[in-house]
Image (cartoon, helix red, strand yellow):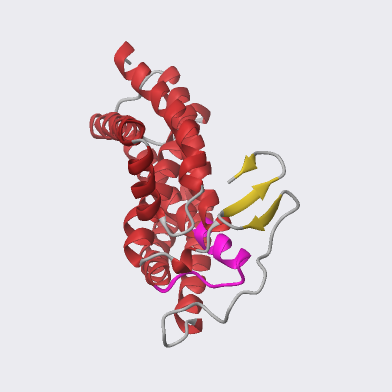
Amino acid sequence: MSRASRWVSCGALVAVIAATPSIALADDGPIEALGRMMNDSPTLTLVTTGVVVVADAGMTTLDTRDALRGSTTERGYYGLELAVAAPQALGFSLAPFYFRISRWSPVENLLLLLPAQAWSASLATHGAWSLASTSLTPNARLGVSFLVGVDWALSVTALGSASWDEWSPLEVGVVETGVGVAEGVFAFVRAAGDGDHTGQWLVLGSWSTLLLTHGVLSLVEHDDDGSSGGPVDARVTGPFASPVEGGAVGGVSGIF
């Protein structure tokens, strides 16, 4: 891996950590949050966002190249991939717990939140998996990492919505249902045909079935106006978080 690539990847990690408090203070959705950040500090916003996107795109390109060639990169790269992607995946995964995303627009949920969650989780999974084992071919490892990333994004969104006593937003429920059907069929077919990894495929298929079930329930339980249930008087919080105006106070990590 070139020195420039290392600096870009490390810069992305710093950028994510630096940008997280500002992003997380958004009550009205990520689009308005980015607008406020642009007004407050356009240069910092453009640089941090650009560095993160470039770093993730670069790692995705390298992983795709290796998958197409059937080659494996040195372990140091996979460690760096995990170090850069894992904090992003964690940050994006926390969003549905801290913010009532049912109030966000479908564009924000489908084109910003879910892709960010799935992309970062896929890269983190690929980095961790490649460090732990290279028993699967590079293309299979990349493909399954993508499936795990998508499942992770839908799962944390469902759990985050549940913490507000709501089902997933309507548009997310549609995606859950579609992914659950397609991935479930694929995983169970592979479980029958890949004797060496039957157990792993069954786990993935079971995960898909849970997503399918939750997606269908999310569609059924939505009111005619598209909301995911009645008004929420108080949100469900863990021992380290409590609701406040503008976000939540975390007992360990501060204000979000």
Number of numbered markers: 0
| Residue drawn at the location 46% of the way across and 50% of the way down | 195
Q: Answer yes or no: is residue 221 visible.
A: yes
Pick out the residue farthest to the right.
Answer: 239
Q: Nearer the viewer, residue 46 or 4?
A: 46
Answer with the quarter of the image where residue 142 lies.
top left
Single out the residue that lies furthest toward the top: 3
Instruction: Judge whether 188 appears above or below 196 on screen.
Output: below
160 part of magenta stretch? yes
Q: Which residues are magenta?
A: 155-170
92 drawn magenta = no
Give coordinates of residue 238: x percent, y percent.
72, 55
* Residue under the point 56% across and 60% down: 160
Q: Vertical placement of 97 versus 62: above or below?
A: below
121 relative position to 107: left or right: right
Q: Position of residue 223 (x, y in %)?
A: 47, 85
Left or right for 69, reference 255: left
Extreme residue toward the front, this view: 40
**Please, which residue is most extreme toward the bottom here?**
224
Q: Is residue 211 left or right of residue 182?
A: right
Which quarter shows the N terminus? top left
- Pick the residue in front: 118 or 163: 163
Q: Nearer the viewer, residue 82 or 255?
A: 255
Q: Is residue 183 above or below residue 167?
A: above
Magenta highlight: main SS: helix
- Toward which corner of the image does residue 4 lie, by quadrant? top left
- Find residue 204 and report its horizontal and vertical position in percent: 49, 55
Task: Give the residue drawn at x 55%, y 50%.
Answer: 94
The x, y position of residue 175, in whole percent, is 37, 66
Say whether residue 2 is visible.
no
